Structure formats: C-alpha cells, structure tokens
Image (tube, rainbow, N blue to C red):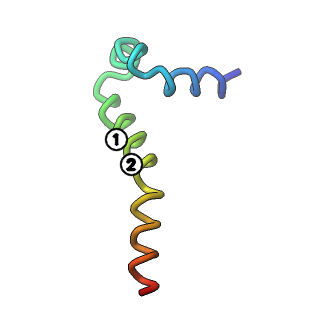
Amino acid sequence: MIMQTLLDLFLHLDKNMGVVIQSYGMWTYLILFAIIFISILPGIVGFVRRKNKE
C-alpha cells in the first residue's frame, strides 16, 4: 500500500506538487534533486563506461 502511494505520488508529481510542498517544505528541493539525479544517473554511468572501454 505504501509502495503504491509513493509510486502514484512520483508518477503524478505535477498534480501533487502542492501537497508535496505543503508537507515537506524546503525538503521538496532535495526530493526533486533525488528524482532527477536517479533518472539521469544510468545514462551518465553508461556513457562513462563506454568511454573507458575505448
């Protein structure tokens, strides 16, 4: 149940942003940074590994 709620929160973040800001305040910046960082990280790691093999 908790996993479903978290998944719904992150999949519909644009609709839930007001609730997130009211609930977490300044922590919202860290949450958004973590989401962006985690989504970009596999691409960066793949690029670096490809460059190291050459």
How crowded pointer 2 is (Cα within 10 Å; few <14, some 14-19, many 20+) is rated as few
Q: Mark 2 points at which residue?
A: 37
Name the kind of residue labelled 2 in the image. Phe
Which residue is painted at 31% across and 22% down in the image?
25
Seen from the viewer's position, the closer of residues 12 and 3 is: 12
Label pair 2/1, CB-CB below 8 angstroms: yes
Q: In which quarter of the image is residue 17?
A: top left
Residue 51, position in %: x, y? Answer: 39, 79
Residue located farthest toward the bottom when viewing the structure as drawn: 54
| Label tally | 2
Q: Mark 1 points at which residue?
A: 33
Residue located farthest toward the right when viewing the structure as drawn: 1
Residue 40, position in %: x, y? Answer: 40, 51
Which residue is painted at 49% across and 27% down in the image?
10
Q: Residue 50 carries which label?
A: none
- Disc 2 is placed on an element classified as helix
Which residue is painted at 66% across and 28% down in the image?
3
Name the kind of residue labelled 1 in the image. Phe
Q: In which quarter of the image is residue 26?
A: top left
Residue 1, position in %: x, y? Answer: 71, 21
Q: CA gap, disc 2 to disc 1?
A: 6 Å
- Disc 1 is placed on an element classified as helix
Depicted 29 relative to depicted 8: above or below: below
Seen from the viewer's position, the closer of residues 21 and 35 is: 35
